[in-house]
Image (tube, rainbow, N blue to C red):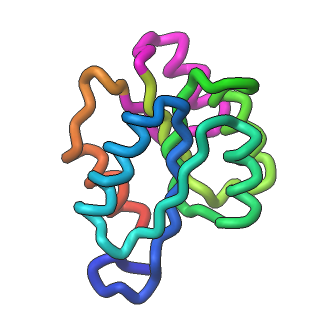
Amino acid sequence: MTISGNTHKVNTLVVEDNAIFRQVFKERLQNQFPSMAIEEASEGNEALQKVDTFHPELIFMDIRLPGQNGFYITKKIMESHPEMVVIILTDYDTPEYRDAAYRSGAKYFFAKDSFDWRQVDIVIRSHI
């Protein structure tokens, strides 16, 4: 499964209720990884449906979502799909939120206010 060799289209799900952030993030991913297939979800139930139909390998998950929060959705995903990689993206960079993210099954935690695309690139490339 490689992006550069285009032997496998990496399915990625972006779960974010802020439409502008979601669109900008998706565009950046598409520009950086042209062979990546990207789906979007704006709330938790939609994310769970897309997990079952789209089968993403990578999931970028916001914490604050309409309905169930990102920790709960991550936990549900990990219970049925432990092979998927969930990356938390949030405005709330606190030790409590980091702990909750990892306890829910997330593999990575990135704060939006100190976001570094080089780190995201390393994470993505390490899982493809």
Q: Is residue 110 left or right of residue 37?
A: left
- Highlighted range, magenta: 91-110
Position of residue 71 relative to residue 83, above or below, is above
The verdict on residue 37 being magenta is no
Residue at the image point whose x is 76% and y is 53% from the top: 49
Residue 30, position in %: x, y? Answer: 32, 62
Q: How many numbered marks are there?
A: 0
95 inside magenta stretch: yes
- Placement of the C terminus among the 4 image quadrants: bottom left
Left or right: where does residue 15 sit relative to residue 126?
Answer: right
Residue 42 versus residue 65 in the image, above or below: below
Q: Position of residue 47 (x, y in %)?
A: 67, 46
Residue 108 in which image quadrant: top left
Give the position of the N terminus as an image quadrant: bottom left
| Left or right placement of residue 14 versus residue 51 in this view | left
Residue at figure coordinates x 38%, y 51% from the top left: 26
Q: Residue at x 62, y 26 (%)?
A: 65
